[in-house]
Amino acid sequence: MHIGILIMTFSLPGCGSLKEKRQRIGGMHERFGRSLMVAVCESGEHDRHDASEWSFVVVANSKREVESQCSQIEDKIQRTVEGRVVNVSRELL
């Protein structure tokens, strides 16, 4: 069993309220939490309107599967989130 932790930090320029933040970042749970391999949560920047941090925990039978799933998550977020990714960190356990 292999575990990967992917943490992504976003800048949300011009975002003026928590409601707007949810609209721009919203749907992370629905998009990625449906997979039995992935757990997702907003892990930081809770009180800021113009930033957000999300953590994804990926569990799979092989290191290659974990890395592939993390890459897919990153790619999909880059295409769908209305914001700029300012930091990405990965850790394999």
Image (cartoon, rainbow, N blue to C red):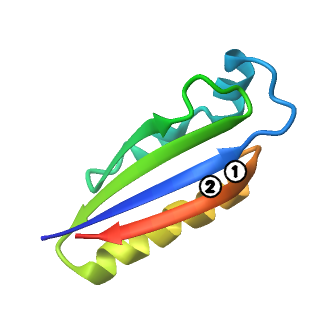
- Above-or-below relation of 17 to 49: above
Residue located 69% across and 27% down the image = 21
- Quadrant of the image occupied by residue 33: top left
Give neighbour class at mark 1: few <14, some 14-19, many 20+ (Cα, 10 Å): few
Q: Residue furthest bottom?
A: 64
Q: Nearer the viewer, residue 53 or 32?
A: 53
Q: Position of 35 compared to 13: left or right?
A: left
Mark 2 and mark 1 in contact? Answer it, CB < 8 Å: yes
Could you say where residue 18 lies in the image, as x and y percent from the top left?
A: 67, 18
Q: Position of 31 compared to 76: left or right?
A: left
Q: Amino acid at mark 1?
A: Thr
- Above-or-below relation of 21 to 9: above
Q: Position of 37 compared to 52: left or right?
A: left
Residue matched to label 1 = 80
Q: Amino acid at mark 2?
A: Ile
Could you say where residue 15 lies in the image, as x and y percent from the top left?
A: 80, 28
Residue located 81% across and 21% down the image = 16
Residue matched to label 2 = 77
Give neighbour class at mark 2: few <14, some 14-19, many 20+ (Cα, 10 Å): some
Q: How far apart are the alpha carbons under marks 2 and 1?
A: 5 Å
